[in-house]
Image (cartoon, grey):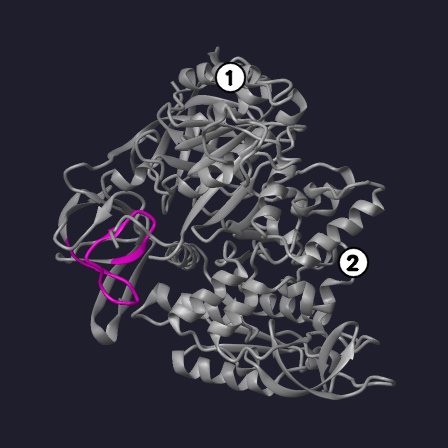
Amino acid sequence: MTAATLDALDALESEAIHIFREVAGELERPVILFSGGKDSTLLVHLAAKAFAPAPVPFPLLHVDTGHNYPEVIEFRDDLVARLGLRLHVAHVQDWIDDGRLVERPDGTRNPLQTQPLLDTIAEHRFDAVFGGGRRDEERARAKERIISLRDAFGRWDPRSQRPELWNLYNGRHAPGEHVRVFPISNWTELDVWRYIQREGVELPSIYYAHERDVFRRDGMWLAEGPWGGPRGAEELVHKTVRYRTVGDGSCTGAVESAAGTVEEIISEVMASRLTERGATRADDRLSEAAMEDRKREGYF
Amino acid sequence: MGRDLLRFATAGSVDDGKSTLVGRLLCDTKSVLADQIEAVHRASVDKGLATPDLSLLVDGLRAEREQGITIDVAYRYFATPKREFVLADTPGHVQYTRNTVTGASTAELAVLLVDARSGVVEQTRRHAAVLALLRVPRVVLAINKIDLVGYDEALLTAISKDFAGLATSLGLTDVTTIPVSALLGDNVVERSPHTPWYEGPTLLHHLESVPVAGPEVNAPFRLPVQYVIRHHATDYRGYAGQVAAGTVAPGDAVVVLPGGAQTTVAAVDTADGPLAAAGAGRSVTIRLTDDIDLSRGDVLAAADAAPTVTSELDATLCWLSDKPLRPGARLLVKHGTRSTQAIVGALGERLDTDTVTWVEAPGQLAINDIARVTLRTADPLPVDDYAAIRATGSFLLIDPPTGNTLAAGLVGSPLE
């Protein structure tokens, strides 16, 4: 391979590393939003590569809905220890306990993450928040900038986004505002998996096929858990499943799959007829513009 | 070596069928998944349409769907066994300069659509002028709706010739003309049975086979330093950045600008180990043989072909803000990894994009204006002509009180 040619994964990796370094160079208090999912795990991997041999110069922030898979929390703590990272956790439960948030009737806590996120950003005066959003995930995200301004209320205004030219990113903001940063904007789901394979990136075990008791709700296989379920006529069945995204347990479905290795997942993704959000995220099905509405309010 | 990556942009006026072409590329490369197709079908039925409106795949914001227009640049992704594609889909009518400049700034190729029934129109000239100004290396003229002109070879040849004249006057050197029907799929992915007289590639085949590398590859080495990586335990000190142009290898003589110190590259590091050489686009960490003062904002460049260090810039601006620009304005310049204050001097000639001629200097610049300008910067900047090296020839103008991006700046006059 000559110095002049980069393959697609090299080009995407170099772009992401460039974005991490720009933010480290220009902003005061960045943080990586970390869910334990594959996209945020990939962010941590890329951040580690961007600053090697020095450690990653910013902490992680996990907004914990309390509706977790124990495997993911264990994975998170191992990763933090292995890379010598600092971790902040915002527990949604704390906001419910002191009355700042009220539990929803459907038990779903994904929409409840926004306020703890914004409160924690304000408390720590974080001015740049890295997220694992990709433009291929959803139509509103296709218009998102790589560095995207949020006002003092954390809101996104899609009508007044700054033009983003060449690779000259503009992270300027007023006090109290912050920017969201999406280093893997240009990656597709397949790129993410191919890169995970190439780099041997470790993921939580729930991404790979395993046996689990699940029940059917709203066309998805949900796991039994403290978030409520199964209810009424919903029946627990034993299945071989895996997760394509990691989210709040009440609304993140598993897919039936026997894919136990990255190679098998790549074959499955290539043959798949559904996007990952459409298949397994009830929160995106709420309306035609569900993601746009949540992003406007400050969601990732 | 796996598949490589081509970044390209589409441009065209409102009814040229651009969204349909993009939808066709996505569908025919099987990049649109079942739930997305289903969502488009549902939305098309809701709007009372008989056939699915493929443009709904692209229009992502609520206001866009409600108004049936595309407001903002949208990024789309598809792949073939040979190559991955990042497509910047730039809307034609609202703020066309802002959107086309944005889309073109990262594109190695642009697909410019014209309607076969109307040929080269005012909008085509405007878009071509912006693509030429931004120095997009390759242009495809896609003559769309050929089904509506009876696949008439003579008509298509005439449009092609008409555009060739425009391209020559703008300095667009690499133009490929492809007759297509986005609606029916002729020559988009599959070769059309109706155009036996056309011997060139289909659009997708062309996109798959053009070189992805731009002229930066063979330019002299440039690397704006982003960040100094220090690791005390191993006494490591390296200068992190993305190779903006040319190639860098251990032993290369380099100069640090704007300071001017000369030194030699000791190593080109990555997290995966040192490289024998790194080319344009690669993020690396450079170690130098001498212990010199170097920080974010400095540029490492080939010692024998260095950029010009200057605080007086002759430049071309694409003005992207509602707030007008007047001579004497105090703004921020962001060039590479350095930001510095600047005072706007005289406004020079403005580009009349309808006639593609430079006309008399205006008193102020309004949104979508393209004009020549002089700038005086507080700190000297190491710059190249945009026409020679895009990365070190481009800059942003930023409004100090709001932080908003006001203009895309190009050093020199890339459109002569």
Helix, strand, or loop for circle 2?
A: loop
Q: Is A219 located above or below residue B389 in the figure?
A: below
The amino acid type found where label 2 is placed reads Ser
Q: Nearer the viewer, residue A117 or B368?
A: B368
Q: Residue at 74% of width from left, 68% of height from top? A: A282
Residue A287 numbered tag: 2
Relative image position of residue B233 (x, y in whole percent): 24, 76
Q: Can residue A78 be seen?
A: yes
- The three-letter code of the residue at mark 1 reads Thr
Residue B303: in magenta span: no
Q: Give the range drawn in magenta.
A: B265-285
Of the two numbered discs 1 and 2 in the rendering, the one whose residue sits closer to the viewer = 1
Along the line of sight, which residue is nearer the eye, A272 or A168? A272
**Quadrant that contains the C terminus of chain B:** top left
Residue occupying the point 28% across, 53% down? B295
Which x, y percent locates residue A95? 71, 77
Q: Quadrant of residue B246?
A: top left
